[in-house]
Image: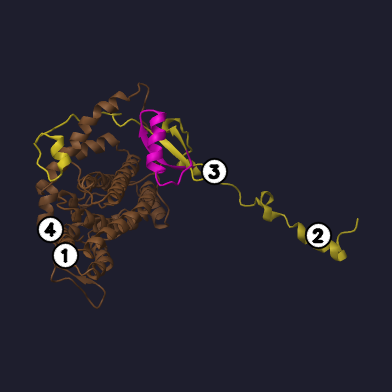
Chain colours: A brown, B yellow
Amino acid sequence: MYGNAYIDTTEKPAGILEGEDPQRLQEFEARVARGEKIEPKDWMPREYRKQLIRMIEQHGHSEIIGALPEGTWITRAPGFKRKLALMAKVQDEVGHAQLLYSAAETLGKTREAMINDLITGKSKYSNVFNYPAYTWADACIIAWLIDAGAIINQVANAKGSYGPYGRALDRICTEESFHLKYGHDNVVTLATGTPKQREMVQAALTRWWPPIMHFFGPSDKISSHTEILMRWKVKMATNDDMRQQFLNMYVPKIWDLGLNVPDVNLKKNEDGKWDYTEPDWEEFKRVINGGGPCNAERLAVRRMAEERGRWVRNALNTSDAKYVAPFA
Amino acid sequence: MIKSLDPRVIRAAIEDSNPIEPLKEMDQWETYEVFHQKKRGDQHMHVGIVHAPNTEMALLFGKEQFGRRGISVNIWVVKTRDVFTTDYEDSDIFETIPEKQYREAGGYKVMDKINKFKKGLGPKD
């Protein structure tokens, strides 16, 4: 699941291309325009490398941190079959982080540096995981709708220009199809169950709707920065387009179950676009900058895992090992 | 102590402030390239990398990472630093002249000759 990364397009766009060799830049852009993939050792603009590292790394962190609210419910899953399924899903997510970190490493940032930036709070991860999973129904809503949002994002990004990221996403998307079905099945079970179960799943949907709407990030103004990143096939769709696609695919499925989406303005227009209440972006900023209910806990748990696992890694060290960045 | 809705986090008894030493270089070990075989008789194919302290662990991680969906019957690993590669910069080494029909099956039109011969129009010696 889970992948999405926020590219801050409000950053000063001036100077993005400053100092780049115009001929190499032109060759690079022509190659991307032809649909060719860029590989790690190829020449690439500085900004291309920088944004890709940031995006892929954030995506990897989201997989790791996202496993925490879902993992919460492994010990208390209702029934053995669901426990097994949830364990398999969480294992997949951690595996996705491994794939993504490897892809980011090909761009020159080591895994240690990425983990350090996560645990010190320097790097971000998907904001939705700064909220807790209060009940089993929350875990079901995450598995269905957050994964659904992530798939929309990942399918788009898999067609991007950077070879290693695309290959990792292809593999990830294959596994996601199980997650989506698993999540849907769980939500349907609750929604078609007893009044108590329906109440639980409705409460979870109501809690998760604002974070879900935040998931794709704020509207991206069509800045020259966004334009360049889209031309380079780093960013494959605008945040608003992805949000629209999500609403179009999933709101009807939610309504099918007789569940209520907590937004009175939500409706589909004749032109096929959805109207919705503008998400609270101040809340989004507050949470992403550390003010959410679980930010401190997530990072504390991550640090604990690094620290308490360190002796095992040290015990396995061999003296002749030497790091070489992966080739592909 | 960190407060949490997760009983596992409560049991872990994590201090409120638990700064740790940053990970040092090689904390996550070096990388191994992983190749898997989908079924007996197929070629092994490159599927990605794992970080591991030794080949034994690399095989274990390779199996968990790439073979856990029952799509592999065999895995190879090799240290990334032991792989030698050509450079995309030098991709001209793969270029060749276009007139190399002589080394392709389509470059040989024997049936044309046989049919011509059968019709009795073949060359006389």
Part of the protein shown in magenta: B45-74
Mark 1, residue position: A195
Looking at the image, is mark 3 or mark 2 earlier in the sequence? 3
Q: Is residue A272 left or right of residue A134?
A: right
Mark 2, residue position: B114
Rounded to the nearest whole Å, what is the CA distance between mark 4 and mark 1? 34 Å
Rounded to the nearest whole Å, what is the CA distance between mark 1 and mark 2? 83 Å
Rounded to the nearest whole Å, what is the CA distance between mark 1 and mark 3? 52 Å
Badge 2 density bin: few <14, some 14–19, many ≥20, Cα 10 Å? few
Rounded to the nearest whole Å, what is the CA distance between mark 3 and mark 2? 42 Å
Label annotation for residue B40: 3
Badge 3 density bin: few <14, some 14–19, many ≥20, Cα 10 Å? few
Find numbered disc 1 in the image and state the secondary structure of the residue it sits on: helix
Tell me if label 1 and label 2 are in contact, CB under 8 Å: no
Label annotation for residue A281: 4
Q: Is residue A318 left or right of residue B38?
A: left
Do dots 3 and 4 share one subunit? no
User: Which kind of residue does numbered mark 4 sit on?
Assistant: Trp
Q: In this rendering, which labeled residue sits more in front, label 3 or label 2?
A: 3
Tell me if label 4 and label 1 are in contact, CB under 8 Å: no
